[in-house]
Image: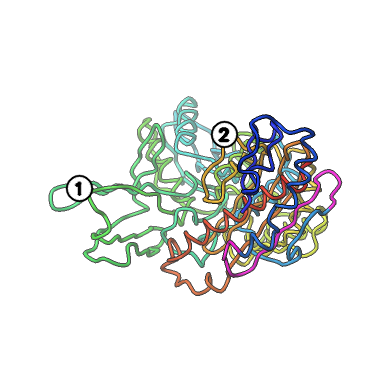
Amino acid sequence: MVKVISKRAFLGGLGASLVSPVFANAPATSIRPAPKLLDFSKRLIPSADALIADANLGGKIGFVVADAKTGLILEAHSPVLPLPPASVAKAITAVYGISSLGLEHSFETQVIATGPVEAGVVQGDLLLVGGGDPTLDTNALAALVKALKQKNVTSIKGDFIVDGRGLPYERMIDPGQPDHLGYNPAVSALNLNYNRVHFEWKRAGQGFDVSMEARSDRFRPAVKMARMQIIDRKVPVYTYEDAKGIDNWTVARGALGKGGSRWLPVRRPDLYAGEVFQVLARSEGIRLPSPTARPSLPGGTVLAAHRSRPLREVAQGMLKYSTNLTAELIGLSASATRDGRPDSLAASGAAMADWMNTELGAKRAFFKDHSGLSDQSRLSASDMVKALNSAGPEGYLQDLMKNVTPLDARGRAINDAAYAVKAKTGTLNFVSSLAGYLTAPEGRLLSFAIFTADLERRAAIPRANRERPPGAKGWSRRSRVLQHQLLSRWALEYGT
């Protein structure tokens, strides 16, 4: 076990007292010179092999730690072993997207009229055209409706068309996941509320009141393209059926308790955004027919447009909150800019892997998607560290990554550690990863990647049980503790 060095202990020259019971009765005054004491303490630091054995994970483990400025590898274990990176893949997606699109790139959603506006009536079709914005929400749609009203539009003569075909449509990111997981939605160029609908239930007498809404902090429009029926059963909790563009859900009455809510995925985000736009337009006195999903033709007049925040901010939010849809849309947009619209999400993932192997010094990267949700993606710790070093320890990636609070050997947060970590975490059932930058006590910057996976246990999980399979939570906790024990070891061993 490696105990975390606190700032007070390190500055007082007592770093070694936190490594071994030998120093349990160290004097209150600091011992000089501190560097010699720390050098002596290195002999008491557990080896990486001992930490791995103590974690009792099973499966496979690969890690690399290097000097971030020189690229010198300081320690490694199975460095070229390809394992699923989970959400650590999002760090590569951020670099791929920014290098392709630019830090200031923004995603635009447009409302286009194919004919002139005469006496408030659009003499043609009205188009809602998606530009791949992963952050478009109900508030933004309401702002587009307001802009349309300011153009004195009251109705249209033609069709109301929703177009999300600027990027490949995928019914879900990973088909191997259960249907009801909100972090596994559909993907298209037109998206809304991270392609999730808010399902809420409240006890009402002997039954329940149920709502399905495109909820935001300002609006709660009800939708009809997602429907919920309560069924008298205990399991399965949810079932799903695609009924020609309608998401038909059922939920087990026995799972509802007294009330609650959750976000469910949307499988036709273009129709979802179109219905919500229609509802919001009606509230402003604008009459629109039901949306029709089809590709739009070039031309027309842009009546309203919404731009996302700059990609720098979008990517930072993606890395902080690990939003899968954001990663997929950044990656797909980058691939489209480089080589034209990709045929599929898998093709775009392969394009990102080729780019990583060519531009960032990797040798065998393979991506099935851009979020890491698929367990078919593969990345080695060596390739990840090469990418971290290539992106530059003083580049934008380190700034975009979130601060990770060090943990002690029991998994508890240590708020006064003498070293700092900026990294991306990744978690799937029986897969856990951590990669980023470690600033050691005396300022040395290290780059690292730690991948752990028990793929046999993961493969044995039935699809219906993949939300919370038995044993996965404890396994992930032990993996996180191992990751942080390795970070503590490296801060002591290589930080001075």
For this orientation, the residue located farthest to the top is 150
Q: Nearer the viewer, residue 463 or 168?
A: 463
Q: Is residue 156 left or right of residue 14?
A: left
Determine which residue is flagged by label 1: 203
Q: Is residue 57 magenta?
A: yes
What amino acid type should be assigned to the residue bearing mark 1? Arg
What amino acid type should be assigned to the residue bearing mark 2? Ala
- Badge 2 or badge 1: first in the primary sequence: 1
The quarter of the displayed image where residue 179 is located: bottom left
Question: Which residue is painted at 43% across and 40% down in the image?
Answer: 277
- CA gap between label 2 and label 1 equals 41 Å
* 437 w.r.t. 295: above or below: above
**Residue 305 circle label:** 2
| SS class, disc 1 | strand
For this orientation, the residue located farthest to the left is 205
Question: Which residue is painted at 22% across and 48% down in the image?
Answer: 209
- Quarter of the N terminus within the rendering: bottom right
- Quarter of the C terminus within the rendering: top right
Q: Could you tell me if residue 367 is visible in this image?
A: yes
Question: Which residue is painted at 30% across and 60% down in the image?
Answer: 251
Q: Nearer the viewer, residue 380 or 252?
A: 380
Question: The magenta stretch spans which residues?
Answer: 54-72
Mark 1 Cα within 10 Å, few/some/many (few <14, many 20+)?
some
Mark 2 Cα within 10 Å, few/some/many (few <14, many 20+)?
some
The quarter of the displayed image where residue 173 is located: bottom right
Q: Position of residue 417 (x, y in %)?
A: 62, 38
